[in-house]
Amino acid sequence: MNTSTGRKPAKTCYEHIGGKLGQLLLEQFVEKGWIAKENPVDRNYYITEKGQEEFTKMGLDLSQIKTE
């Protein structure tokens, strides 16, 4: 981290946002109901209907995400 400018790192893990920023984003998306799990023990999340609306409002093209 460059402490002289106060910038905070936005780490990546492969091609994904990682680190604390990734964790905070995940927590907010879950709290806002934009993503959820079918079952608490599931590893993966899915985008909810509310999430589809909100991410689209943000200008994200969700068609780029493959359907499983």
Image: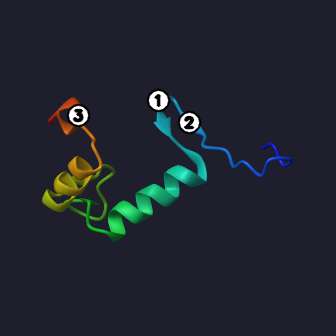
**What residue is shown with label 2?**
12
The quarter of the image holding the N terminus is top right
Residue beneath the point at 46% across and 36% down: 16
Q: Secondary structure at mark 1?
A: loop
Specify the amino acid type for callout 1.
Glu
The mark that comes first in sequence, 2 or 3, is 2
Verify CB contact (< 8 Å) between mark 1 and mark 2.
yes
The single residue placed furthest to the bottom in the displayed view is 31
| Residue 59 in which image quadrant | top left
From this view, report whether residue 15 is shown above or below residue 28: above
Specify the amino acid type for callout 2.
Thr
Q: Which mark is residue 15?
A: 1
Q: At which x and y percent is residue 50?
A: 17, 61
The mark tally for this picture is: 3
**What residue is shown with label 3?**
65
Q: At which x and y percent is residue 56?
A: 21, 47
